[in-house]
Image (spheres, rainbow, N blue to C red):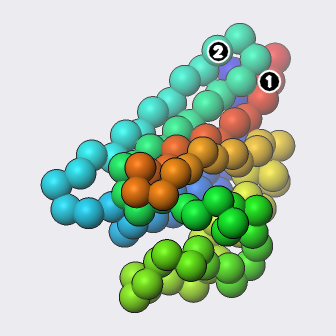
Amino acid sequence: MVRLDQNLLKNCINNLITNAIKYSGENTFIDFNTEINDDRCLITVKDNGIGIPEADQKHLFEAFFRAHNTGTIPGTGLGLNIVTRYAGLMNGTVDFKSEVNQGTLFTISFPNHE
């Protein structure tokens, strides 16, 4: 069983999917997946968009930070900071893997409750 705040979770998922759409080109696929196993609940959002430059990855969750390859794509740099805060309030973590021009995979992980 996983007990999560539905409004916080909705905001996390909404932000990750919105980012995936925003930073991917037209006619691309966005993968959204959930998995509950013996000890964790995993939520993943994967795109094949512009990716995040390696030099920018360490700052990704900082407030107002935007990767240098975002160009004219609008954004405030607050979304991922909020996602990590909300996930943390629910005892979760946010991780990602990304390569420039290959896309990004975000994973939110929550512990199961007995």
Please state which of residues 12 and 44 is positioned toward the viewer in this rendering. 44
Indicate the position of residue 71 as horizontal and vertical percent values. Answer: 43, 84
Instruction: Find the distance from the CA under tag 1 to the CA under tag 2.
Output: 12 Å
Q: Residues within 10 Å of mark 1 (few under 14, many from 20)?
A: few
Determine whether 65 is above or below 2 in the image: below
Quarter where residue 111 is shown: top right
Q: Which mark is residue 37?
A: 2
Horizontal and vertical percent for residue 76?
Answer: 57, 85
Which percent across, then down, holds residue 10? Answer: 53, 54
Q: Secondary structure at mark 2?
A: loop
Q: Which residue is mark 1?
A: 113
Q: Residue furthest top?
A: 38
**For this rendering, which residue is in front, 28 or 88?**
28
Q: For this rendering, which residue is in front, 25 or 21?
A: 25
Circle 1 — which element? loop
Residue 57 visible somewhere in the drawing: yes
**Mark closer to the chain start, 1 or 2:** 2
In the depicted structure, whether residue 46 falls above or below residue 11: above
Amino acid type, callout 1: His
> Which quadrant: the C terminus?
top right
Q: Amino acid at mark 2?
A: Asn
**Residue density around tag 2, few if under 14, some if 14–19, many if 20 or more, within 10 Å:** few
Q: Which residue is pictured at 60% across the width and 45% down the height? A: 97
